Amino acid sequence: MTILGEMLIGARAVKGTSAPIQAINPATNEKLEPVFGGGTQADVDAAVKLAWQAFDSFRETSPEVRASFLEACADEILALGDELVQRAMAETGLPQARIEGERGRTMNQLRLFASVVRSGNYLDVRIDPAMPERQPLPRNDLRLRMIPLGPVAVFGASNFPLAFSVAGGDTASALAAGCPVVVKAHSAHPGTSELVGRAIQSAVAKCQLPEGVFSLLFGSGREVGSELVKHPLIKAVGFTGSRAGGTALMELAANRPEPIPVYAEMSSINPVFLMPEALKARGDAIAKGFVGSLTMGAGQFCTNPGLVIAQSGAELDAFLATAATELSKVATQTMLTPGIFSAYCSGVDQLKGNASVREVAAGQGSDAPNQCQAGLYVTSAEAFIADESLCDEIFGSTSLVIECKSVEEFARVAEHLEGQLTATLQLDEADYAATAALLPVLERKAGRILCNGFPTGVEVCHAMVHGGPFPATSDSRTTSVGSAAINRFLRPVCYQDLPQALLPDALKDGNPLAIRRLVDGQDQR
Amino acid sequence: MTILGEMLIGARAVKGTSAPIQAINPATNEKLEPVFGGGTQADVDAAVKLAWQAFDSFRETSPEVRASFLEACADEILALGDELVQRAMAETGLPQARIEGERGRTMNQLRLFASVVRSGNYLDVRIDPAMPERQPLPRNDLRLRMIPLGPVAVFGASNFPLAFSVAGGDTASALAAGCPVVVKAHSAHPGTSELVGRAIQSAVAKCQLPEGVFSLLFGSGREVGSELVKHPLIKAVGFTGSRAGGTALMELAANRPEPIPVYAEMSSINPVFLMPEALKARGDAIAKGFVGSLTMGAGQFCTNPGLVIAQSGAELDAFLATAATELSKVATQTMLTPGIFSAYCSGVDQLKGNASVREVAAGQGSDAPNQCQAGLYVTSAEAFIADESLCDEIFGSTSLVIECKSVEEFARVAEHLEGQLTATLQLDEADYAATAALLPVLERKAGRILCNGFPTGVEVCHAMVHGGPFPATSDSRTTSVGSAAINRFLRPVCYQDLPQALLPDALKDGNPLAIRRLVDGQDQR
């Protein structure tokens, strides 16, 4: 397959006529061929209208058809072979093992959603049979199922060119729900996006689905992105990116004549609490694990541990000494884009310039372009609570250690935090009592609470929550990773006294789909 | 119990010092004693802070404690006896049978949520056990449960002084979820509100729950209501009322530093489609049933059938003739408030003044205060589609019949509609094909689709959806009636590798709560 710099509008490939986009190899700052044409308002309209035309038939495809389609997407992505891996590496500066791992994750994610579609649990079927003899009034026959919201706009993320991009979690869960998807590709990896987009386009054709099920547009967030979110036939939005970008989409969506849900995963500094006994017993090991998590992938993860909370004293000093030694061995890593590199440098400069913050360690340096030099800083709990700017996310391998006077102060620091994707606890059995006091605060602040690990690494499974209170996400009621992500794109419809012939299969007598159903409040299958 | 005109802030009763509020008997326009003092910003803050203080302990009460509390609320409301019935009648103009029926519905609703809490299904527990040997990477132990959002602001509705008010569906579902509730009472029935509020306050005390679990405030929507929605410790809002009121709350909530979900149930005209064969076979019976639904409770229901769609011709003429005869026998009924009566008259006047609309029937008239005179009007599909104002809800016993040239035109009319709570089909077997073509449109437009009945009457059960796309509600993903209403007040939290001692009971090994759990993707109990 060759990358042609074309958008995919249903079954067509179209060269955009708006402002051109060209990828940059961040390791060299060299431009990568070809030039991509940005989309226009007319392209947005064409893609969304095709999605709308596809919606009613796509949403009523059988579970088997939709599951097979998701699996076909996975197969077509794998069939792109090494071209995809090489292009993604060139566009992102990420190493081969990471890209190949991410490709596996992307395919597993599509297959997980295929299994979710087949299970039918997401339909949340409820049946309350008629009670014609009930006094004082009879009860009607009432049956509920979930149906998809409509065409979904998905914004590719920069930091996962496969798993959170064109065929990432938002796209997979929306398609699984029965929503056609229009992707606005991230301009940092347009070639990767086109390749994956063509794989999905091919899966749509092979599965004989209506072409509007999937489209891929290029262009700027301000133009193509805004037009997408404002389009009256778009019914939900998936986004992973910056807080400024996410809140801008939330505002656009809230101000539409018909407001729509926006699922924006935005900003998190992922506090790590070092409980005193754990710190005492194994501070060295924790320091080594922490530096590994902090510097993985140049820290370009939503769940990067940007904050460490610990009690001051000899144990913390030892922890910091080990962390400093470990960090000093870490070579620079290429960041995803010059823009991300520049934002990282600004964030670090701001931290360095803060009088209440001191630098305790730095990774190795480099003169090559867009290199992330890791860093570790310390401040006091008092200073942290007094200065809102210290809560800002610095996207990259930099973390801030908060020195507390006592373990009781941990809860004050936690209460001060905004919403988070994760909160991590390093703890031993002797820390249980102190942890139990802290847990209620962490539950209110974070979508995932983890013990004796580090927050990087987000399993794609049923129990995962990659979400959290604002500003971690725009909607704390949801997750963007794991099978529960499908719930974002569904709404309930109740059918009262419909004849069997007109009921959808999920609700028919005899349970032809063999799915879990709540009948009169009891599970039946 | 005596009505003292007091607000309930936790365990205290407080006479408000802001603008006074006094109920009016709409049947006579006489003022009812006592005078209620409106709340201030300080009262809002006091109530919300108590709610916040109660939150962490209330949300971790056992299912049995919370279920018993909901049942105690029901018992305490019943124990108010005839005083509650008489006061509600005086404040609303509604007849005794209706108020007693609504009281039963309110208690059943509280008891349904008690059963929901005991079943534990709403916790959506998912467990993905650790896989330490998995290659290339081990899997952590991951466990998900839903937790409540936080304190909820509930706005009482005017048209159900019990079932959608102080102890109505929003309050019951929020308390069931584990959210403390602060109610802003509707100023039309403050005495009813105080009585029911005192019943809940008493249940809180008897169940030895923290006082902040429930508070009741009086005051205007613009002052007390806005302050509530803007308060940083309020985490969700439940509202039933006008489109203007609901969208104002949505805007307030979206513009908070931390946006929060608003569940506003607002505006619906509830189309009724008369399929040709059903109209031919039993137009007379349908006309009688329709007039009964239209005029029940002076049409003051969210699901009142405000629109009828039918094919023009002799069958429709016969339907209209029967409906006119039936309607002419209907006596006026007292509306809930002078404001609602005045809005109804304006809406009817606007319809009468529309050149493309003709009046075909009217109910009886009356010179008594605030009397709703029923009315039936006709226009063409063309005129309806050309004039947005014809889609506006007229809250009361008035309906508009849309004459279509063919059954195919039904879909065009349906596509033109905004989001609805309900869509009704009168159909016979010979109408199945035409109905099947219309159903996908109705699914996209409405939360509940019903056959051969009328939309008034909303069963409180598991399969009910009282919701729908904007502007029927602010959030089509939810329902405000039925057990699924609890989902509005929950968010997921994932626990990774937490020791058993620190896990909540819902997630512990051995399933101590004996609830449904999805283990590795399979249901287990």
Image (cartoon, coloured by chain):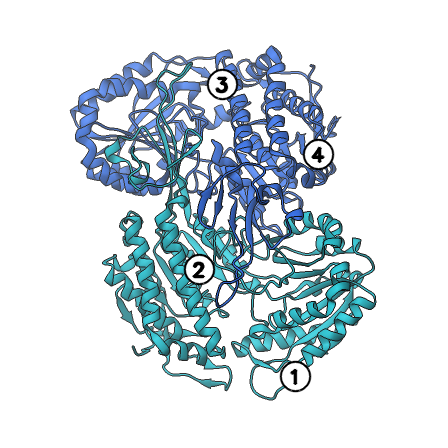
Chain colours: A blue, B cyan
Mark-to-mark CA distance, 3 and 2: 56 Å
Do residues under tags 1 and 3 come within 8 Å of each other at their CB atoms? no
> Residue type at mark 4?
Gly
Task: Sort mark 1 into few (<14), some (14-19) or many (20+) by Cα contacts within 10 Å.
Answer: some
Residue furthest bottom as drawn: B367
Rendered position, A480 above or below B23: above
> Residue type at mark 3?
Asn
Lateral position of residue B56 relative to residue A235, left or right? left
In front: mark 1 or mark 3? 1
Lateral position of residue B491 relative to residue B411, left or right? left
Mark-to-mark CA distance, 1 and 2: 34 Å
Mark-to-mark CA distance, 4 and 3: 39 Å
Residue A319 percent coordinates (x, y)? 23, 21
Is residue A206 at least partly visible in the picture?
yes
Mark-to-mark CA distance, 2 and 4: 40 Å
Tell me the quadrant of the picture where the N terminus of chain B can be found.
bottom left
Mark-to-mark CA distance, 4 and 1: 54 Å
Badge 2: chain ID: B
Residue at the disc numbered 1: B364
Rendered position, B312 above or below B408: below
Q: Which mark is residue A212?
A: 4
Image quadrant in which you'd find residue B45: bottom left
Mark-to-mark CA distance, 1 and 3: 80 Å
Task: Sort mark 4 into few (<14), some (14-19) or many (20+) by Cα contacts within 10 Å.
Answer: many
Foreground residue among B420 and B506: B506
Residue at the disc numbered 2: B169
